[in-house]
Amino acid sequence: METKFLTQKYLGNTLGDIFIAFGIILVFGILSKIVRYFVKHKLSKLADFTETDFDNKLLIRLEKPIGNYVIIFGLSLAKTFLTFTYKIDTILIDTITALAIVNTGYLIFKVSDLFLELLFNLSQKTKLTLDDEVVKYLSKSVKIFIVLLTLIIVIENYVIFSSKQTTNILHKIFIAFITINIIYILLKLTDALVEYFKPVIEKTPSKLDDQLLPMIRKIIKIVIVIIGILSILKNLGYDISTLLAGLGIGGLAVALAAQDTIANFFGSIVVFTDKPFQIGDRIIINGKEGVVEDVGLRSTKLKSLQGTQFIVPNREIANSSIENISRRPARKVETEYGIVYSSMPDQINRAIAVIKEILQNQELVRKDYKVYFAEFRDFSLIIKAIYWCETEDLDVFVNIQTAINLKIKQAFAENKLDFAYPTQTLYLINQEKNQ
C-alpha cells in the first residue's frame, strides 16, 4: 500500500521522487545553517590570531553567500530527481542558474565593499581631501555597476528573454546606465576638484578668480552632460552626425539672433583673462565712476559713489578704455588754504612751515610733498599743498585727509593765523566836508 502511494505521479513525478527532492532541499538548508555557523564562529576565531581585522571582516561578508551556495547546490541536486516538460525544465534550470548568478553578484558586491572601505581608510590617512571624495563617489559607482551587470546577465540567461532583439536591447540599456554612471562620476569629480582648488584660488590677490571658478565648474558640467547624452543617443542607434549637423544649423541661427549675448560672453572671457579690475576696485568707464560689485557672464555690476547700482555689458567693457583708480600706488591731493590779506610775510612762512610739519609727521603720506605760496586772490592769499597718500582704500584715504585738515585748523589757531573768507571794505565819503 505504501509502495503504491509513493509510486503515484503528480506533474510527471512520483511522490517518492518529490519527497526525495524536498528532503534534499531540507537537508541542504540545514547544512547551509551549519556552514554559516562554522564560518562565523569557528573560522573567525582562527582569524583573531592575525594582525589585522581584515580576515574577520572578509568572513562576515562571505558567511551568507557561502550559505546561499549550499542551498543553490541542494536545489540543483533536487532537480535531478524530478522530470518535467522541456519548457518547465528549462525555466527551472534558468531559475537555479539565475539564483547562482545573483548570489555571485551579491558576493562580489560584499567583497568589493570591503576593499573600497579599505581604500577609503587609506585615503583618509593622506593630507589631501580630494582622494577621499574620489573614493567615495567611486564606491557608489562600482556598486551600481555590479548590480546592473548582475541583472543583465540574469535576464540574458532566461530562455524567455534570450532572443537576439531582447539581448540587443538589454545591451543598449546596460551601456546607457553605465554611461549615466560615468557622467555621475565625472560630475562629482568636477565638484571635488573645484572644492580642492577653491582654497588655493581664495589665496590669490585677485577676487575675479573666485567668480571664475564656479563659472568653469558649470561649463565643464554642461560639456560632460552634452557628451554623455550624445553617447547614449549613439548607443541607442541614433545618427549623431545628422543631429550635430542640425544643431550646427540651429546654432548658427541662434548665434545670429543672440549676437549681443555672445559678444557679452566673450567680453566676460576678456575680463577674466586680462583682469583689468577685480571685485572691490574703483574704476571709471565711459565717464562713469563706481566700485565693482559683481562680474557675470553677461554684464558687470558697479556701485556709484552716490550709492546707485549701474550695469555695464561686458562687450562694452572689452571695447572701452578703463581707468582703475584703485590700482594707483598713491592718491594725489591738491588743496588750497587761504589766509587773510593782512598776514605779514613771516606769518605766511609760518603757515607754510606748519603745513609741512603736519605732512611730514602724518602716516601714509609720501615725503615728496609740495607746500608753497601760490597766488593772490580777490579775498585771500593762497597757500597750495600737494601731497600723495599711499593707500588704495578709500576709507583710509578720506580719514587721512580729515586728520590733516583738523591738525592744520588747530595749528593755525595756535599760531594766530587767520583763514580768509569773502569780505568787502566800503569807504564812505563825507560829502558835506568836501563841499
Image: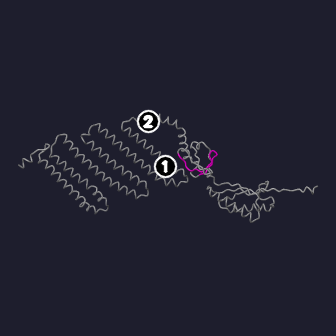
Q: SS class of the residue under badge 2?
A: helix
Q: Identity of the amino acid at label 1?
A: Pro
Q: Which residues are magenta?
A: 281-296
* Residue 347 coordinates in the image, percent (x, y): 79, 62
Residue 35: percent from left, percent from top: 21, 56
Identify the disc placed on residue 244: 2
**Vertical position of residue 152 compared to residue 431: above or below:** above
Left or right: 309, with 371 as reference point: left
Q: Secondary structure at mark 1?
A: helix
- The colour scheme used to paint the residues is one colour
**Distance CA(mark 2)–CA(mark 1):** 28 Å
Q: Position of residue 8 (x, y in %)?
A: 9, 45
Give the position of the C terminus as an image quadrant: bottom right
The residue under the point 63% across, 52% down is 328
Which residue is denoted by mark 1 in the rendering? 214
Residue 293 colored in magenta in the image? yes
For label 2, the crowd category at 10 Å Cα-Cα, with few meaning under 14, some 14 to 19 and many 20 or more, is few
Residue 323 visible at all? no
How crowded is the residue under tag 1: few (<14 C-alpha within 10 Å), some, or many (20+)?
A: some
Front-most of residues 308 and 86: 308
Q: Residue at x 11, y 44 (%)?
A: 9
Q: Amino acid at mark 2?
A: Leu
Instruction: Give the mark nearest the N terminus, 2 or 1.
Output: 1
Q: Main secondary structure of the magenta part?
A: strand
Q: How many marks?
A: 2
Residue 423 located within the stretch drawn in magenta? no
